[in-house]
Image: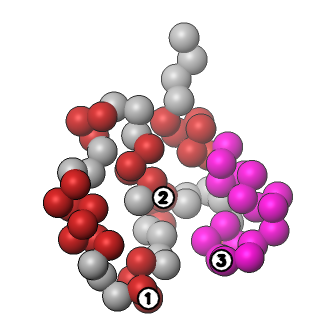
Amino acid sequence: MVQCWHPDKSCRPSFPSLSCHLGLPVSQLLHWSTEEVTGVGPQAIMLGAPLKTAHKLHMTLQNTYCTQP
């Protein structure tokens, strides 16, 4: 679901794609692909992970999708 935040709107998933994805069983919804969390450590994908880990994930996403002017 990280793709939903891509700065290039054409790279974001479509509404039908999101609807299909959200129709999956909960066990599949609570899963992050390895390419979405590369470099942030295994705790980043755990519910209730330490805030420091979430911050590292946030910074990784910022570095991946944000460009400097």
Residue at 76% x, 61% y: name it: 53
Outermost residue, left direction?
A: 16
Measured from the top left, where is residue 20 in percent x and y? 21, 71
- Mark number for residue 36? 2
How far, Cα to Cα, is label 3 from label 1?
A: 13 Å
Q: Secondary structure at mark 1?
A: helix
Measured from the top left, where is residue 17 in percent x and y? 21, 61
Q: Quadrant of residue 10?
A: top left
Is 11 magenta? The answer is no
Give whichever of discs 3 and 1 has the lower sequence position.
1
Q: Secondary structure at mark 2?
A: helix
How far, Cα to Cα, is label 2 from label 1?
A: 17 Å
Do the CB atoms of the residues marked 2 and 1 lie less than 8 Å apart? Answer: no
User: For the stretch drawn in magenta, what is the main secondary structure?
Assistant: helix
Is 54 magenta? The answer is yes
Name the residue nearer the viewer: 63 or 30: 30
Question: Which residues lie in the magenta part?
Answer: 43-59
- Mark number for residue 46? 3
Q: In the visual, does 60 lie left or right of 16?
A: right
Q: Of the residues tagged 2 and 1, which is closer to the observer?
A: 1
**Which three-letter amino acid code belongs to the residue tagged 1?**
Ser
Quadrant of the drawing holding the N terminus: bottom left
